[in-house]
Amino acid sequence: MLLLFILIVIFLFAMTGFHRGGVASALHLGSTFFSLWVASRFYHPLSHYSKLFIPYPRTRAYETDFVVALDHHEARFNHIVVFLLIVIVVKTMMYLVINSFDQLFETQRMTVFNRLMGAFVACCSAFICLHYICFLFALFPDATLQNALAHSMTGQWFVKEVPLLSEFTLNLK
Protein backbone atom coordinates (compact mmCIF):
# COMPACT_ATOMS: atom_id res chain seq x y z
CA MET A 1 0.00 0.00 0.00
CA LEU A 2 2.83 2.39 0.86
CA LEU A 3 4.58 1.46 -2.39
CA LEU A 4 1.46 2.44 -4.34
CA PHE A 5 1.35 5.79 -2.54
CA ILE A 6 5.05 6.36 -3.33
CA LEU A 7 4.57 5.51 -7.01
CA ILE A 8 1.56 7.83 -7.30
CA VAL A 9 3.49 10.73 -5.74
CA ILE A 10 6.47 10.17 -8.05
CA PHE A 11 4.14 9.99 -11.05
CA LEU A 12 2.39 13.24 -10.08
CA PHE A 13 5.71 15.04 -9.63
CA ALA A 14 6.95 13.67 -12.97
CA MET A 15 3.81 14.90 -14.72
CA THR A 16 4.28 18.35 -13.20
CA GLY A 17 7.93 18.40 -14.27
CA PHE A 18 7.01 17.26 -17.78
CA HIS A 19 4.56 20.16 -18.01
CA ARG A 20 7.00 22.75 -16.63
CA GLY A 21 10.08 21.73 -18.57
CA GLY A 22 13.69 21.43 -17.51
CA VAL A 23 14.50 25.04 -16.63
CA ALA A 24 11.40 25.69 -14.52
CA SER A 25 11.74 22.32 -12.77
CA ALA A 26 15.40 23.07 -12.00
CA LEU A 27 14.38 26.42 -10.49
CA HIS A 28 11.73 24.71 -8.37
CA LEU A 29 14.26 22.09 -7.22
CA GLY A 30 16.67 24.91 -6.36
CA SER A 31 13.94 26.59 -4.34
CA THR A 32 13.39 23.30 -2.50
CA PHE A 33 17.08 23.12 -1.59
CA PHE A 34 16.99 26.77 -0.53
CA SER A 35 13.96 26.16 1.69
CA LEU A 36 15.70 23.15 3.28
CA TRP A 37 18.74 25.31 3.96
CA VAL A 38 16.68 28.14 5.51
CA ALA A 39 14.73 25.66 7.64
CA SER A 40 17.94 24.04 8.88
CA ARG A 41 19.07 27.45 10.15
CA PHE A 42 15.87 28.46 11.95
CA TYR A 43 14.05 25.32 13.12
CA HIS A 44 15.82 24.80 16.44
CA PRO A 45 14.78 28.01 18.27
CA LEU A 46 11.18 27.60 17.11
CA SER A 47 10.89 23.92 17.97
CA HIS A 48 10.57 24.67 21.69
CA TYR A 49 7.34 26.58 21.02
CA SER A 50 5.85 23.84 18.86
CA LYS A 51 4.83 21.81 21.90
CA LEU A 52 2.14 24.39 22.56
CA PHE A 53 0.57 24.16 19.11
CA ILE A 54 1.45 20.70 17.78
CA PRO A 55 1.47 18.19 20.61
CA TYR A 56 3.00 14.76 20.18
CA PRO A 57 0.26 12.11 20.24
CA ARG A 58 0.87 10.45 23.61
CA THR A 59 -2.08 8.10 23.65
CA ARG A 60 -0.15 5.03 22.55
CA ALA A 61 3.30 6.43 21.92
CA TYR A 62 4.96 4.49 24.69
CA GLU A 63 3.26 1.22 23.72
CA THR A 64 4.07 1.46 20.00
CA ASP A 65 6.90 -0.55 18.51
CA PHE A 66 8.62 1.81 16.11
CA VAL A 67 10.09 0.39 12.92
CA VAL A 68 13.02 2.80 12.84
CA ALA A 69 15.05 2.83 16.03
CA LEU A 70 15.40 6.49 16.97
CA ASP A 71 15.89 8.09 20.34
CA HIS A 72 13.66 10.84 21.77
CA HIS A 73 10.70 10.42 19.44
CA GLU A 74 8.83 13.40 20.88
CA ALA A 75 11.74 15.82 20.46
CA ARG A 76 12.46 14.55 16.94
CA PHE A 77 8.78 14.87 16.06
CA ASN A 78 8.72 18.50 17.27
CA HIS A 79 11.93 19.33 15.40
CA ILE A 80 10.81 17.76 12.14
CA VAL A 81 7.33 19.33 12.24
CA VAL A 82 8.76 22.82 12.79
CA PHE A 83 11.41 22.13 10.15
CA LEU A 84 8.74 21.12 7.62
CA LEU A 85 6.51 24.09 8.45
CA ILE A 86 9.43 26.43 7.73
CA VAL A 87 10.17 24.51 4.52
CA ILE A 88 6.55 24.87 3.40
CA VAL A 89 6.44 28.62 4.12
CA VAL A 90 9.75 29.34 2.35
CA LYS A 91 8.88 27.01 -0.55
CA THR A 92 5.53 28.78 -1.00
CA MET A 93 7.23 32.18 -1.11
CA MET A 94 9.78 30.89 -3.61
CA TYR A 95 6.97 29.35 -5.68
CA LEU A 96 5.27 32.75 -5.90
CA VAL A 97 8.52 34.42 -6.96
CA ILE A 98 9.29 31.78 -9.61
CA ASN A 99 5.74 31.86 -10.97
CA SER A 100 5.92 35.64 -11.33
CA PHE A 101 8.50 34.95 -14.06
CA ASP A 102 6.29 32.35 -15.72
CA GLN A 103 5.97 34.46 -18.88
CA LEU A 104 9.68 33.97 -19.59
CA PHE A 105 9.32 30.19 -19.61
CA GLU A 106 6.23 30.20 -21.82
CA THR A 107 8.00 32.05 -24.65
CA GLN A 108 10.49 29.25 -25.23
CA ARG A 109 9.43 26.22 -27.19
CA MET A 110 9.32 22.99 -25.21
CA THR A 111 11.12 20.10 -26.83
CA VAL A 112 10.61 16.51 -25.76
CA PHE A 113 14.11 16.45 -24.29
CA ASN A 114 13.38 19.59 -22.25
CA ARG A 115 10.15 18.06 -20.96
CA LEU A 116 11.87 14.75 -20.08
CA MET A 117 14.58 16.64 -18.22
CA GLY A 118 11.82 18.46 -16.34
CA ALA A 119 10.24 15.13 -15.40
CA PHE A 120 13.59 13.79 -14.19
CA VAL A 121 14.35 16.88 -12.10
CA ALA A 122 10.83 16.83 -10.64
CA CYS A 123 11.38 13.20 -9.60
CA CYS A 124 14.32 14.43 -7.51
CA SER A 125 11.89 16.80 -5.78
CA ALA A 126 9.52 13.88 -5.28
CA PHE A 127 12.26 11.92 -3.53
CA ILE A 128 12.81 14.81 -1.12
CA CYS A 129 9.09 15.11 -0.41
CA LEU A 130 8.66 11.36 0.05
CA HIS A 131 11.64 11.20 2.38
CA TYR A 132 10.05 13.65 4.77
CA ILE A 133 6.61 12.04 4.51
CA CYS A 134 8.05 8.61 5.32
CA PHE A 135 10.16 10.11 8.11
CA LEU A 136 7.02 11.58 9.68
CA PHE A 137 5.34 8.18 9.32
CA ALA A 138 8.28 6.63 11.16
CA LEU A 139 7.93 9.07 14.06
CA PHE A 140 4.14 8.96 14.37
CA PRO A 141 2.98 6.48 17.03
CA ASP A 142 0.27 4.75 15.03
CA ALA A 143 0.30 0.97 14.69
CA THR A 144 -1.13 1.10 11.16
CA LEU A 145 1.60 3.43 9.89
CA GLN A 146 4.32 1.49 11.67
CA ASN A 147 2.99 -1.76 10.21
CA ALA A 148 2.92 -0.26 6.71
CA LEU A 149 6.52 0.90 7.11
CA ALA A 150 7.60 -2.46 8.51
CA HIS A 151 6.27 -4.27 5.44
CA SER A 152 7.62 -1.78 2.91
CA MET A 153 11.29 -1.95 2.02
CA THR A 154 10.81 1.12 -0.15
CA GLY A 155 9.37 3.10 2.75
CA GLN A 156 12.26 2.09 4.99
CA TRP A 157 14.68 3.06 2.22
CA PHE A 158 13.11 6.53 2.05
CA VAL A 159 13.63 6.95 5.79
CA LYS A 160 17.14 5.53 6.24
CA GLU A 161 18.97 5.30 2.93
CA VAL A 162 18.29 8.33 0.72
CA PRO A 163 21.77 9.64 -0.12
CA LEU A 164 22.74 12.78 1.83
CA LEU A 165 19.16 13.55 2.84
CA SER A 166 18.72 10.76 5.39
CA GLU A 167 21.91 11.69 7.20
CA PHE A 168 20.91 15.37 7.12
CA THR A 169 17.47 14.61 8.59
CA LEU A 170 18.74 12.19 11.22
CA ASN A 171 21.14 14.88 12.45
CA LEU A 172 18.35 17.41 13.08
CA LYS A 173 18.44 17.67 16.86
Image (cartoon, rainbow, N blue to C red):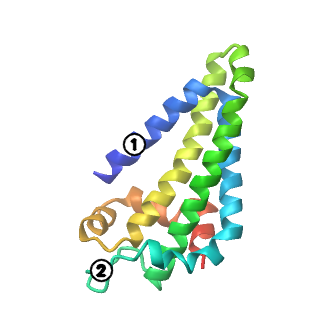
Residue at horizontal 45 percent and vertical 58 percent from the top: 133
Q: Quadrant of residue 53?
A: bottom left
Q: Position of residue 51 (x, y in %)?
A: 47, 79
- Sort mark 2 into few (<14), some (14-19) or many (20+) by Cα contacts within 10 Å: some
Q: Which mark is residue 60?
A: none
Residue at horizontal 60 percent and vertical 46 percent from the top: 92
Q: Is residue 141 left or right of residue 115?
A: left
Q: Nearer the viewer, residue 133 or 58?
A: 58
Question: Is residue 19 among the parts visible in the rendering?
Answer: yes
Q: Nearer the viewer, residue 124 or 132?
A: 132
Question: Is residue 108 among the parts visible in the rendering?
Answer: no
Give the residue at mark 2: 65
- Sort mark 1 into few (<14), some (14-19) or many (20+) by Cα contacts within 10 Å: few
Residue most extreme to the front:
52
Q: Amino acid at mark 2?
A: Asp
Give the residue at mark 1: 7
